Amino acid sequence: MAQPSSDEVSEVEILLADDDAGHATLIRNNLRDVGLRNTMRHFEDGQQVLDFLNAKPNGVNIDKSNAYMLLLDVHMPKVNGVEVLRHVKADPELRLIPVIMLTTTDDPREIRTCHELGCNEYITKPVGYDQFVEVIRRLGLFLQVVRVSKLTP
């Protein structure tokens, strides 16, 4: 697979979609603890993510000259993560955004559905605190080395 040229790659902004404020805080803090300094934007429901991605008037909108990574919970109010994933991967520009499902759901049918729709990874959040922290720490180390292309060159 060809690597994007350096002018197509920029610092990745992390889009975190999780309706659980405690989980979102733990994720942000633990990503910072392993040295991830990327800009992070938190969304509390799937509709907020879609509004951002679809450039709704009078709001904060996506900058298509940037690179993004979406950490997406499955079960959220208004629009669930599977529908957000479906929307992102159906859009010719947005489908370049890597999507990591980060959820407590470990139902094999849901995992399969997310992969069929094009998620890049599916990570189950452990219930125990120490295990949760370790999973997020490993995710942070991964995010430090991953390369993501801008949406528009």
Image (tube, rainbow, N blue to C red):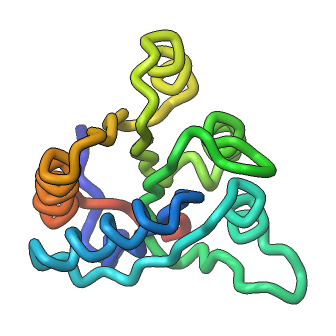
Up-down: is 110 above or below 120?
above
Estimate the x, y position of residue 82 in percent, counting from the top left: 63, 34
Outermost top residue: 109
Q: Is residue 5 above or below residue 105?
A: below
Q: Is residue 90 left or right of residue 85?
A: right
Residue 62 % position (x, y) = 64, 75
Viewed as shown, does residue 23 lie left or right of 65?
left
Name the quarter where the N terminus is drawn.
top left
Q: Is residue 54 above or below residue 72?
A: below
Question: What is the total number of numbered labels drawn onto the structure image?
Answer: 0
124 w.r.t. 57: above or below: above
Q: Is residue 135 left or right of residue 15?
A: left
Residue 9 in percent (x, y) is at: 32, 71
User: Residue at position x 38%, y 37% from top?
Assistant: 120
Question: Which residue is rendered at x = 52% and y = 19% of the image?
Answer: 110
Image quarter for residue 8?
bottom left
Give coordinates of residue 2: x percent, y percent: 24, 45
Q: Is residue 84 left or right of residue 17?
A: right
Residue located at (43% from left, 40% from top): 103
Q: Nearer the viewer, residue 62 or 107?
A: 107
Q: Residue furthest front?
A: 128
